[in-house]
């Protein structure tokens, strides 16, 4: 996925994209808008139902599944489903989308889509970085797993991999939270020849620039998103609501990906929700609140990503480090049993990552392609409709 050239310079890095009131709207605006909404075309009504149903399903995940790889895949599946329906709406209503007042809203949405492409690139690189961590886990499991007895050499080999992994994850965390002007910032580009120590890993190939910031990019996606107005809803037969809905689905999806997966200058300040007048607003607002609460947990505050499997790595590595620091040789039967127990726990996290990362990356790539295709086809169909008038 090639990088996009957009950089939003007008947004202040100190201002949080999560602190804006994404669904907070004056109740009289929303009520008047809904009263004028009775003549919507059936496809627009179906679109609203689809968004609500898909995100109710995503929000139904229990706390143990939230932010896991399977949950992120479900979120991306929902996004792709909604994106496809919106693409059809754009095509079906192409002759109307070039006329005021909807023309500005659809143009702003296509601009947001371009900004979302860089987020997809950064997330793909974050997934690639997790793969580098996975290689260190393989070393630990190779050294300590399926062994009749565990000796000093095996413990030393595993200990070195654990230290390298710990340093790499700490380094990625400082990259995610430090100012983007810091010389330590980097993307997570692919490396064909990985150095022996993860601590010395530096990408020479950037998917996003050194000054790119996830926080600023989300701010850029969120700006110029006024609530649907009753007079515009009447004038556009509800098309403005469809564009508004798709914009927030795009924003939430990008926000959740940044929250879960390592990327440059991510940051996780709290979001605020003051009203839930749309059917899809309740599950999305609920998810924002749950993810924000997760980020406030004491053991998650300084993480490089809220993904459940990342938390599993951090926990297992910490316990393994503590254990290997405390053992003497030869190992007692009790210590050896405890080492094997820790290795089994680490193996479960490893398998979850091994099985989940490739399908997750494919969905991120597909989201990138669908965003590009939807924007290209949308602009083209609108232009063709104008040419025929």
Image: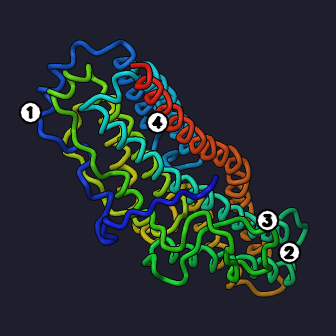
Identify the secondary structure beneath mark 4.
helix
Category of crowding for the residue at label 4, using alpha-carbon neighbours closer than 10 angstroms: few (below 14), some (14–19), many (at least 20)? many
Choose top left, top right, bottom left or bottom right for residue 366: top right
* Residue drawn at (72%, 69%) of the image: 338
Q: Which mark is residue 28?
A: 1
Percent x, y of residue 136: 75, 70
Comparing marks 4 and 3, which lies closer to the viewer?
4
Q: Which mark is residue 58?
A: 4
User: Which residue has dot 3 on it?
Assistant: 138
Percent x, y of residue 178: 45, 77
Disc 1 and disc 3 in contact, CB within 8 angstroms: no
Cα–Cα gap, marks 1 and 3: 58 Å
Cα–Cα gap, marks 4 and 2: 44 Å
Cα–Cα gap, marks 4 and 1: 29 Å
Comparing marks 4 and 1, which lies closer to the viewer?
1
* Residue drawn at (41%, 47%) of the image: 111
23 on left or right of 374 = left
* Residue drawn at (33%, 13%) of the image: 41
Cα–Cα gap, marks 1 and 2: 70 Å
Category of crowding for the residue at label 3, using alpha-carbon neighbours closer than 10 angstroms: few (below 14), some (14–19), many (at least 20)? some
Category of crowding for the residue at label 2, using alpha-carbon neighbours closer than 10 angstroms: few (below 14), some (14–19), many (at least 20)? some
Identify the secondary structure beneath mark 1.
helix
User: Which residue has dot 2 on it?
Assistant: 150
Category of crowding for the residue at label 1, using alpha-carbon neighbours closer than 10 angstroms: few (below 14), some (14–19), many (at least 20)? few
* Residue drawn at (45%, 73%) of the image: 177
Comparing marks 1 and 3, which lies closer to the viewer?
1
Percent x, y of residue 244: 31, 36
Disc 4 and disc 1 in contact, CB within 8 angstroms: no
Cα–Cα gap, marks 4 and 3: 32 Å
Percent x, y of residue 255: 42, 52
């Amino acid at each position: 996925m090639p990088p996009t050239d957009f950089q939003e310079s007008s947004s202040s890095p100190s201002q949080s994209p999560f602190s804006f009131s994404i669904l907070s709207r004056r109740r009289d605006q929303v009520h008047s808008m809904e009263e004028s909404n009775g003549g919507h075309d059936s496809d627009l009504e179906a679109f609203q139902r689809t968004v609500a149903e898909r995100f109710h399903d995503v929000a139904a995940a229990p706390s143990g599944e939230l932010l896991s790889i399977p949950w992120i895949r479900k979120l991306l599946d929902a996004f792709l489903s909604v994106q496809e329906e919106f693409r059809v709406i754009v095509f079906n209503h192409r002759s109307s989308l070039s006329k005021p007042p909807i023309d500005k809203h659809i143009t702003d949405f296509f601009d947001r889509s371009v900004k979302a492409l860089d987020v997809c690139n950064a997330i793909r690189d974050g997934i690639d970085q997790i793969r580098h961590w996975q290689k260190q886990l393989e070393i630990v499991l190779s050294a300590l797993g399926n062994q009749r007895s565990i000796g000093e050499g095996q413990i030393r080999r595993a200990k070195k991999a654990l230290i390298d992994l710990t340093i790499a994850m700490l380094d990625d965390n400082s990259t995610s939270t430090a100012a983007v002007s810091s010389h330590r910032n980097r993307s997570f580009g692919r490396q064909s020849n990985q150095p022996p120590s993860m601590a010395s890993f530096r990408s020479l190939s950037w998917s996003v620039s050194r000054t790119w910031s996830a926080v600023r990019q989300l701010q850029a996606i969120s700006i110029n998103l006024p609530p649907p107005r009753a007079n515009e809803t009447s004038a556009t037969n509800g098309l403005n609501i469809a564009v508004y809905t798709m914009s927030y689905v795009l924003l939430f999806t990008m926000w959740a990906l940044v929250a879960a997966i390592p990327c440059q200058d991510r940051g996780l300040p709290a979001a605020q929700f003051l009203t839930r007048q749309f059917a899809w607003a309740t599950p999305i607002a609920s998810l924002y609140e749950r993810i924000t609460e997760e980020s406030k947990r004491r053991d998650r505050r300084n993480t490089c990503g809220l993904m459940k499997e990342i938390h599993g790595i951090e926990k297992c590595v910490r316990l393994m480090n503590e254990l290997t620091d405390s053992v003497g040789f030869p190992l007692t039967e009790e210590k050896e049993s405890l080492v094997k127990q820790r290795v089994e726990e680490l193996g479960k996290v490893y398998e979850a990552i091994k099985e989940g990362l490739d399908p997750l990356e494919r969905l991120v790539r597909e989201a990138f392609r669908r965003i590009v295709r939807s924007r290209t086809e949308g602009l083209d169909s609108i232009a063709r409709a104008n040419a025929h008038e």
